[in-house]
């Protein structure tokens, strides 16, 4: 797998370049849109959930609490996962004309598109860091965020590759995933702290804990918000888990991508 | 020439009928896996050896499997059975500019398309200038391709594809692109590639073009191989089959229309039949460009008529009157005629180009002023090509060239 990725790096890069160059080409604000959207959602959710539903965030590493900062930490992680997933799923269809006519590895445009999406994640991360700097919530545990996010990206891309090839075969997958993602968002401790679910329903808490995305989001909460060092083994597990998912996704993708020219 | 560039051995490709494809999960669950009976073979039992450095043509009807075969050679489809072996890099001109992104400039698209076709970045950069030069689009190369005309789009696509240094180039129906000058350029380039020992596989309906370009031609019919060999031989037998089939399918392709005697002309003469026949007298339902055929107009008279003037007008299906033939004007005088006769008119070396023609027959008296009978739209017949050339306009005038 790694050799295949290395051999095709120019092709992946070419697709990434295309997506990067064309993403906001016809819009005036360009890349600022990639921040405007998540920040607007952050604002809305922060207002609704802290003012209306009175959800309380746990204390930050510096003792203060900020629901917005807590929410945004989770959102950055969740957005990374959800955006890679949805983007990957549409790639085969949107490159269909090409795949029907020229032979090249079909995962190249999928991974290329994801690479461009990572730019948005980095932008969001910069805003998050700025936010914590203003709040005075700084710690060395921040560095854990890097392996955690890499693990998240690998995990998301692995699932994305599986779903994208399934979506090429069965057009329904896209719609099912949209529904499942919507549900999964609320089964991940992004809008609420884990303690809130634990105190309300045992079954629900069990489901939330079984959701792999909860592991990544919680690890991010620890590292960025709570400034608690996640266990070294835990981070390793997240990274290895992400890598294994990616490897499995890549394998499944290639297993079913042989007839991609006919499927599309 | 003995080296084989592409070896196709006993290849078959099975498709599921698209209407029966289990494309959604629900269908898959409700109706189970598709049954074998609904499959069909687009290509079957095809074996070909395409020599290195040759230009190889594939001909056949639409749906005969030529494009499927080409896609299998290009690796887009996997053969269901059999094997295809090939040497070197295969580039396909199956769809020019398929990888272009409308928002990107011509130059950016050259880079992208080159990567997709598998050329390393360094080499793309090295040939980029050549590509721009070849396409003749230097002026517009930094504009987004969405502003290009379709001709410009295709020119850039062709330029990129042929500069990818392919060992085998697959060409599907794209030779009819661009203006005359650019086409010339494309052909020159294809010849140059051939001289450089590259292999070119062409799918086309332009039979004349194929005859001129190819070293060998294979004819596919319903997915199986009919004939392989010299282009002229294969094209000739393909055309013979096509014409025979078309005749069998529509025996009335030279269609006689009802005679309504419009205008209520009352006279002693009636036009009774109109048909076309070959020179040996047998009835025809189509004519061939360049081959003499006879138009037969039956007339019947109740009393002797002096020197009738039989005028045959030929109208092209698109509307224009192509010509009007008159025995008076050509100097044929029939003097007194009575009873039933057939007026036979030989169209020498039929100058009509392929298309459908309508025949209108008017018969005047010897003065040419009194209409005796008129049969508008008496017959419609097709003219077909014997060579595959379609030509331009309606007629091919007998002409000679001289260089002085």
Image (cartoon, grey):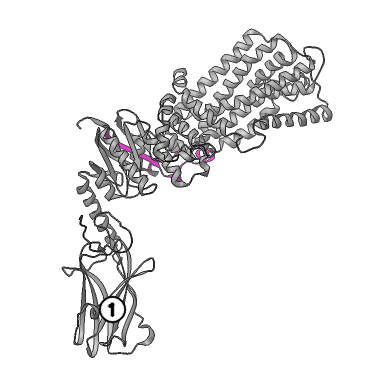
Q: Residue at x 81, y 22 (%)?
A: A56
- Report the number of numbered marks: 1
Residues B367 and B87: in front is: B367
Residues B260 and B54: in front is: B54
Task: Please tell me whether residue B386 belongs to the stretch shown in magenta.
Answer: no
Q: Position of residue A196 (x, y in %)?
A: 78, 21
Q: Secondary structure at mark 1?
A: strand
Can you say whether A183 is above or below A146 in the image?
below
Q: Position of residue B91 (x, y in %)?
A: 36, 34
Q: Is residue A31 left or right of residue A107?
A: right
- In the picture of the structure, the residue carrying the numbered disc 1 is B311
Viewer can see residue B175: no
Which residue, as the protein is rendered here, is positioned at the far bottom?
B303
Q: Quadrant of residue B93?
A: top left
Which residue, as the protein is rendered here, is positioned at the far front?
B404
Q: Is residue B358 left or right of residue A38?
A: left
Q: Is residue B371 left or right of residue A249?
A: left
Can you say whether B374 is above or below B394 in the image?
below
Can you say whether B368 is above or below B399 in the image?
below
Viewer can see residue B115: yes
Q: Position of residue A46 (x, y in %)?
A: 78, 28
Magenta part of the chain: B8-37
Can you say whether B258 is above or below A237 in the image?
below
Point out the image quarter for the C terminus of chain B.
bottom left
Point out the image quarter for the N terminus of chain B.
top left
């Amino acid at each position: 797998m790694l050799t295949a990725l290395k051999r095709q790096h120019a092709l992946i890069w070419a697709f990434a370049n295309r997506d990067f160059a064309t993403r906001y080409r016809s819009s005036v604000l360009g890349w600022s849109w990639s921040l405007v959207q998540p920040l607007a959602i952050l604002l809305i959710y922060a207002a609704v959930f802290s003012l209306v539903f009175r959800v309380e965030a746990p204390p930050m590493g510096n003792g203060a609490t900020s629901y917005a900062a807590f929410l945004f930490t989770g959102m950055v992680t969740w957005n990374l996962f959800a955006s890679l997933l949805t983007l990957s799923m549409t790639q085969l269809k949107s490159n269909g004309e090409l795949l029907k006519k020229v032979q090249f590895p079909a995962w190249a445009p999928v991974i290329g598109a994801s690479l461009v999406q990572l730019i948005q994640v980095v932008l969001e991360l910069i805003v998050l860091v700025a936010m914590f700097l203003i709040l005075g919530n700084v710690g060395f545990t921040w560095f854990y965020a890097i392996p955690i996010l890499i693990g998240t990206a690998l995990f998301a891309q692995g699932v994305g590759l599986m779903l994208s090839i399934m979506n090429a075969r069965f057009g329904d997958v896209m719609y099912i995933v949209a529904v499942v993602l919507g549900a999964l968002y609320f089964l991940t401790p992004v809008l609420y702290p884990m303690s809130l679910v634990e105190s309300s329903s045992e079954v629900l808490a069990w489901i939330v804990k079984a959701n792999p995305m909860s592991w990544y989001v919680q690890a991010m909460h620890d590292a960025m918000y709570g400034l608690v060092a996640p266990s070294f083994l835990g981070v390793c597990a997240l990274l290895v888990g992400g890598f294994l998912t990616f490897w499995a996704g890549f394998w499944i993708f290639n297993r079913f991508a042989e007839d991609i020219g006919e499927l599309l | 020439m003995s080296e084989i560039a592409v070896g196709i051995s006993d290849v078959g490709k099975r498709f599921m009928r698209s209407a029966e494809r289990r494309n959604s999960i629900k269908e898959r669950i409700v109706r189970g896996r598709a049954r074998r009976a609904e499959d069909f073979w687009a290509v079957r039992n095809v074996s070909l050896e395409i020599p290195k450095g040759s230009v190889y043509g594939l001909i056949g009807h639409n749906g005969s499997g030529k494009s499927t075969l080409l896609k299998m050679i290009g690796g887009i489809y996997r053969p269901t059975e059999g094997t295809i072996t090939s040497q070197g890099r295969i580039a396909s001109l199956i769809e020019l500019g398929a990888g272009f992104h409308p928002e990107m400039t011509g130059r950016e698209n050259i880079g992208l398309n080159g990567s997709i076709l598998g050329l390393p970045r360094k080499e793309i950069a090295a040939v980029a200038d050549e590509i721009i030069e070849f396409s003749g689009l230097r002026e517009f190369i930094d504009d987004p391709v969405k502003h290009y005309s379709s001709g410009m789009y295709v020119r850039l696509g062709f330029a990129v594809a042929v500069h990818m240094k392919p060992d085998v180039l697959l060409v599907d129906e794209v030779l009819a692109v661009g203006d005359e000058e650019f086409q010339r350029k494309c052909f020159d380039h294809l010849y140059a590639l051939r001289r450089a020992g590259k292999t070119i596989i062409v799918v086309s309906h332009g039979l004349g073009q194929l005859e001129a370009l190819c070293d060998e031609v294979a004819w596919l019919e319903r997915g199986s191989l009919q004939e392989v060999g010299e282009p002229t031989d294969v094209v000739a037998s393909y055309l013979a089959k096509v014409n025979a089939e078309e005749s069998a399918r529509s025996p009335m392709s030279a269609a006689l229309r009802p005679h309504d005697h419009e205008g209520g002309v009352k006279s002693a003469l009636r036009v009774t039949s109109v048909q076309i026949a070959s020179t040996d007298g047998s009835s025809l339902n189509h004519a061939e460009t360049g081959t003499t055929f006879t138009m037969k107009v039956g007339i019947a008279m109740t009393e002797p008529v002096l020197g009738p003037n039989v005028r045959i007008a030929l109208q092209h299906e698109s509307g224009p009157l192509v010509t009007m033939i008159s025995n008076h004007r050509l100097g044929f005088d029939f003097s007194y005629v009575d009873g039933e006769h057939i007026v036979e008119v030989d169209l020498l070396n039929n100058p009509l180009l392929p298309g459908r023609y309508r025949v209108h027959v008017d018969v005047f008296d010897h003065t040419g002023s009194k209409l005796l009978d008129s049969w508008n739209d008496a017959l419609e017949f097709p003219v077909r090509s014997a060579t595959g050339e379609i030509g331009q306009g309606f007629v091919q005038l007998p002409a000679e060239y001289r260089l002085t």
